[in-house]
């Protein structure tokens, strides 16, 4: 069955400045690498729709969504936090990024596709219910999870987050929702400088000290994620796919390799096949070294394409 690939031209128009690491060229780098590897034409391509208010308010209060729309500048950049800015196209791009996750969930849960990857920006996992931060505006993966739970009536959804930064926003959204298991690995100490406790059966937080590489990452996944996921038996796997733990990425100090992203994707596929009819929706989070990002994301997608 197909693997869907969702994006939208508007995701390239969100621009926080040419010196900003969360740059539009990230998406094209991934697409170029998919072409080089002969993978691009194997994917089921869909333009991302806008997320509707109904989709967004499952995660964010209406006053937050309206407040963000009101902060959208007519020209120039509007300051959101020390690293996060809105340009005139940001709000539309954020709607498309969240909407990609909604459509990807639709495609996977209706059997049109087995797995999906959302090649979108702005990313989402730092966006809390009422706070945009860390390059994020709407929590895309959370919108997908709530769509699966509230629209399709799923009872158990797992979110895997291997971005080098803690997905504080996703944890903020699901801290009190027993329908979601959140498994994370991240560098600590590192922005946002939080290392929240693990909650058995609900939140599995694997903090890795600076300098950690493949062995520490794989050990955390094997010993902590897999056990929790087998016990939880998710009906759908969502992935916050950040690739900034790569050794070549200067945003942080972990030392993962491109092969590690293939390996963790293989683990996710195995668990999805075991519990969730193979269903995976993955969405791009971080990853700022363009060559490492392209190679890692293409390897991730290549593994999603294997039956
Ligand atoms: Zn990150």
Image (spheres, grey):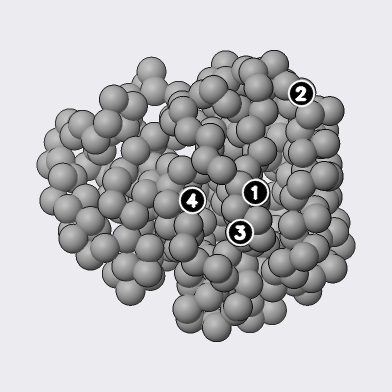
**Mark 2: secondary structure:** loop
Which residue matches tag 4?
171
Distance from the alpha carbon under mark 1 to that under mark 4: 10 Å
Q: Which residue is mark 1?
A: 204
Residue drawn at the location 26% of the way across and 63% of the way down: 61
* Badge 1 element: strand
Q: CA distance from mark 2 to mark 1?
A: 19 Å
Residue pointed to by mark 3: 202
Q: Nearer the viewer, residue 71 or 155?
A: 155
Question: Residue 150: percent from the left, percent from the top?
Answer: 47, 78
Q: Which residue is mark 2?
A: 213
User: In the drawing, does residue 234 fall left or right of residue 136?
Assistant: right
Is there a contact, CB below 8 Å, between mark 1 and mark 4?
A: no
Q: Is residue 241 visible?
A: no
Quadrant containing the N terminus is: bottom right
Q: Nearer the viewer, residue 161 or 77?
A: 161
Q: Is 179 in front, or is 67?
A: 179
Given residues 26 and 164, the one toward you in this image is 164
| Residue 227, position as x, y percentages in the image | 80, 55
């Amino acid at each position: 069955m197909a693997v869907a690939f969702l994006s939208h031209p508007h995701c390239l128009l969100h621009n926080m400045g040419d010196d900003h690491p969360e740059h539009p060229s990230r998406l094209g780098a991934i697409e170029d690498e998919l072409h080089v590897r002969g993978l691009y034409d194997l994917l089921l391509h869909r333009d991302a729709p806008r997320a509707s208010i109904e989709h967004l308010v499952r995660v964010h209060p209406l006053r937050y969504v309206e407040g963000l729309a009101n902060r959208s500048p007519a020209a120039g950049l509007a300051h959101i936090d020390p690293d996060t800015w809105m340009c005139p196209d940001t709000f539309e791009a954020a709607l498309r990024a969240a909407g990609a996750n909604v459509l990807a969930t639709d495609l996977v849960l209706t059997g049109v596709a087995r797995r999906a990857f959302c090649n979108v920006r702005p990313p989402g996992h730092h966006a809390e219910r009422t706070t945009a931060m860390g390059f994020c505006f709407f929590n895309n993966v959370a919108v997908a999870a709530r769509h699966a739970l509230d629209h399709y009536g799923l009872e158990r959804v797992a979110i895997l987050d291997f971005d080098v930064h803690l997905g504080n926003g996703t944890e903020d959204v699901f801290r009190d929702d027993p329908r979601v298991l959140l498994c994370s690995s991240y560098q600590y100490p590192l922005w946002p400088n939080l290392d929240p406790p693990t909650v058995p059966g609900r939140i599995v937080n694997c903090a890795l000290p600076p300098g950690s590489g493949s062995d520490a990452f794989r050990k955390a996944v094997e010993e902590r994620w897999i056990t929790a996921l087998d016990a939880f038996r998710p009906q759908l796997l969502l992935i916050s796919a950040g690739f900034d733990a790569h050794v070549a990425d200067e945003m942080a100090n972990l030392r993962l390799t491109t092969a590690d992203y293939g390996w963790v994707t293989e683990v996710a596929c195995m668990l999805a096949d075991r519990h969730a009819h193979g269903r995976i929706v993955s969405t791009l989070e971080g990853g700022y070294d363009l060559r490492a990002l392209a190679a890692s994301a293409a390897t991730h997608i290549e593994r999603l394409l294997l039956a």
